[in-house]
Amino acid sequence: RTAAEQRAAQAEHRAAVAEQRATEELAARAALEAELARMREQLRQLGREEAR
């Protein structure tokens, strides 16, 4: 492979790695947001029980 082809292949690989990391980050964020929503719902339920 020529040097230019080698650089292009490396750049493509870096782009693929970056895309994978971004996808993992989005998935982790979505999981945290779901957990937060569950916690908020539990707090809401507790508040409702205390108000009784």
Image (spheres, rainbow, N blue to C red):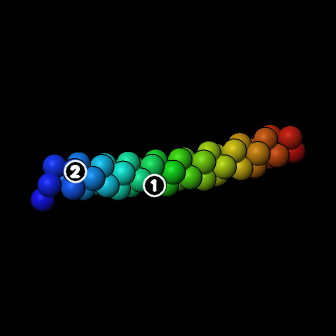
Q: Return the residue nearer the eye: 33 or 26.
A: 26
Asked whether residue 24 is in view, the answer is no
- Disc 2 crowd rating (10 Å Cα; few below 14, some 14-19, many 20+) is few
Q: Is residue 35 left or right of residue 43?
A: left
Residue placed at 87% from the left, 44% from the top? Answer: 52
| x and y percentages locating residue 50 in the rendered image | 80, 40
Q: Return the residue nearer the eye: 39 or 15.
A: 15
Asked whether residue 39 is in view, the answer is yes
The single residue placed furthest to the bottom in the displayed view is: 1
Please name the amino acid that badge 1 sits on: Thr
Q: Residue under label 2, please give it.
A: 4
Q: Residue under label 1, please give it.
A: 23
Residue 1 occupies which quadrant of the picture?
A: bottom left
Q: Is residue 27 left or right of residue 14?
A: right
Please name the amino acid that badge 2 sits on: Ala
Residue placed at 60% from the left, 53% from the top? Answer: 34
| x and y percentages locating residue 44 in the rendered image | 76, 45
Residue 40 occupies which quadrant of the picture?
A: top right
